[in-house]
Image (cartoon, grey):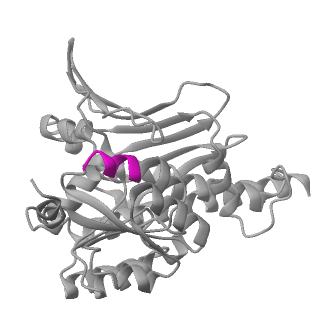
Amino acid sequence: MSSHTDATRTLGVGILGAGPVTQAIHLPSLARLGDILTVRHIMDVDPAVAESVAARVGAAHSTSIEALLGDPNVEIVAICSPHQFHAEQVIAACRAGKKAVLCEKPFAMNAEEAAQISAVSEETGVPIIVGAMHTFDPGWLAAQENWDHLPETAHTIRSSIVLPPNARFEDFATEIITRPAGGAPDYSDPEVIKGALRGGIMGLAIHDLPLIRRFTPDFKDIEVLEARHVRPFGYVVSLRTPTRTIELRAAMNNTWKPEWSFEAFSDDVSLRIDFTPSYVQAGSAVATFTRGTQTTIHGPFEHNGYEGEWRELAALATGAKQPPSAQTLIDDLTFALDIADATVANVEAQHAVAEGAHA
């Protein structure tokens, strides 16, 4: 087969932002999907980074979003830039007439931006997906096909994440705080704690919040019972709705062994999904159902959620699949923002009580 037919058969990808996620996750995933997708253009505000990352995959490079969006070889745009730019870049990509857009989470900073994005997506007909990779993982999809009434009957849902120290998450925890981080964070400062918790929820828990929301029909009535920051980086947040108990836990410690699990329990069924860590291309999640004494295991499958995400984008770009409803994306975002806000408010209330006790 000539290279010319290959070029017409694969869809051209443009990536905005060439940081660690692009380098360590998206490029290896795309390399395995060379029969359907080809990286054509990499943009980064740092010209040296743009050039060196583009050179690895033989793509064009630039330092401006206009150059990438104006490139006729780019049909799918992935937005991997700092999150405050996501909304305007998603909107620009839709207006540029691209075939599909992937935006890293969170795809907007607030509900107003989210509504604006959804209106533009609808008006231009350009499908958008948000990079919550667990929702595209074959292990999660297999659970979905086999869980019967569990989302309606579950009473307890847990997300638990244990990760070895990773500079990216430490950067995230400090990046959220709008003050210069002088060495180790000052954990006696309630603002630092609040920033770290908000960063934990919007940076880490957000991967599993769309899964949790799927099991929480009354997600709009969520309340934080307890919120604790775990040092050096982590959280324990207990939540409830009128019908559900939810626990979010994360810890970074000196363990070498990462563990990332999602669990849902009803009176007679439990589901546990074990996800592979993001930065290791280690295949799919495994879903385990326990019904009485019977255990059923689904997985592992051949690819992980990141690869699943790109397969989905290719299907959307060619019209082989219908995009998720914009309302789903908005609800996922507002659910995460509501939890982040309620967690911070809980910490403020704890601090006020402690101050009162000292007064």
- From the viewer's side, name the closer residue of 223 and 19: 19
Is residue 19 toward the left or the right of residue 2 in the image?
Answer: right
* Residue 88 in view: no
Image quadrant in which the C terminus is located: bottom right
- From the viewer's side, name the closer residue of 234 and 128: 128
The answer to whether residue 167 is above or below residue 41 is above
* Residue 82 in view: yes
Residue shown at 71%/64% (left/top)? 177
Give the x, y percent position of residue 173. 66, 54
The answer to whether residue 259 is above or below residue 48 is above
Q: Is residue 29 magenta?
A: yes
The answer to whether residue 293 is above or below residue 176 is above
Is residue 16 toward the left or the right of residue 73 in the image?
Answer: right
The answer to whether residue 54 is above or below residue 287 is below
Q: Which residues are magenta?
A: 27-33
Is residue 333 toward the left or the right of residue 118 in the image?
Answer: right
